[in-house]
Amino acid sequence: MTHKYQLDDLLRIMTQLRHPEHGCPWDKQQTFASIVPFTLEEAYEVAEAIANEDWQELPSELGDLLFQVVFYAELGREQQQFDFAEVVNRICHKLVSRHPHVFGELVDSSLSEQQLKDNWEQQKALEREAREQTSILADIPKALPALARAVKIQKRVARVGFDWDELAPVLDKVHEELEEVLAEVEPEQSPSAALTEEVGDLLFAVANLARHLGVNPEDALQQANRKFERRFRGVEQRVADSGKAFSEHTLVSLDQFWDDVKRSEIK
């Protein structure tokens, strides 16, 4: 029977990997900063497994992500900053304090989703105050993907009333930002700093539009990416079937392949 490892085994394995004499050379040279890219990659692989409903692979991907946490904890222990036990302690305290309706004296399972969100934000506000963070935007991670961070910023400021309560001005803002982008376009020249700024404003406005429509822009863009990839693979197949290289096809003929792929999806 295959041995079933436990969490203590993982912590022990991590310590051995970092052993000064007998550890793994690669693991020994890692720092907090150097493993951040791997952490992000593992988080995306977890998301990919869930999106694909690959339940057989998900435990493995979650294990890879957990290993990242254990790695950080080992680095913290070595530097006498914190250890894995403190990581667990912090999250337990946070979860208990942010769920007074579950762990508090007045347990209430009938709260609406909005009430739960309000309570959560109130508790986070108290935590920011305790850390002397005066801005409501202070604890939004700068390392978040830009699109996700835009929505988080917009949701946060909306909680203090800095938001439109109708769709029309949101749409007007998108059109306004698009016009400002076009005003900065200079054909056959590299993008200017002003153009980059205006494109950023346009993306921010579109993210805001998605939020007002109740659409997660990250999910919508991921779906658009998958759709484009699927259709382009169909174009690639038709190019291969034609016996010619891409360079031998005009954009008109490639567009015809694209339209053909789209029509085939409707059938």
Image (cartoon, rainbow, N blue to C red):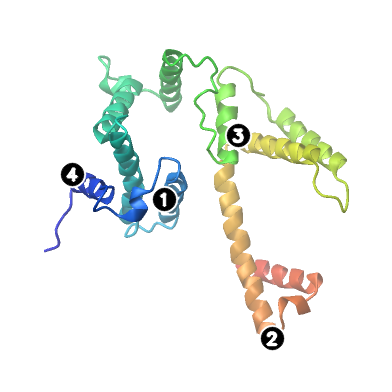
Q: CA distance from mark 2 to mark 4?
A: 59 Å
Question: Residue tagged by mark 4?
Answer: 8
Q: Is residue 189 left or right of residue 172?
A: right
Q: Amino acid at mark 1?
A: Glu
Q: Earlier in the sequence, mark 4 or mark 3?
A: 4
Q: Earlier in the sequence, mark 4 or mark 1?
A: 4
Q: Are marks 4 and 3 in contact (CB under 8 Å)?
A: no
Q: Earlier in the sequence, mark 2 or mark 4?
A: 4
From the viewer's perspective, is residue 13 above or below residue 145?
below
Q: CA distance from mark 4 to mark 3?
A: 39 Å
Which mark is on residue 42? 1
Per the image, label 4 sits on a secondary structure element best described as helix
Where is residue 128 drawn, in percent x and y? Answer: 45, 18
x 26%, y 22%: residue: 103
Question: Residue tagged by mark 2?
Answer: 243
Q: Are marks 1 and 2 in contact (CB under 8 Å)?
A: no
Q: Amino acid at mark 2?
A: Gly
The part of the image, by quadrant, that contains residue 33 is top left
Q: Tell which of 144 and 37 is nearer to you.
A: 37
Per the image, label 2 sits on a secondary structure element best described as loop
Labels 3, 1: front one? 1
Question: Residue tagged by mark 3?
Answer: 150
Label 4 CA crowd tier, 10 Å (few <14, some 14–19, many 20+): few
Where is residue 155 drawn, in percent x and y? Answer: 56, 28
x 20%, y 46%: residue: 12
Labels 4, 3: front one? 4
Q: Earlier in the sequence, mark 1 or mark 2?
A: 1
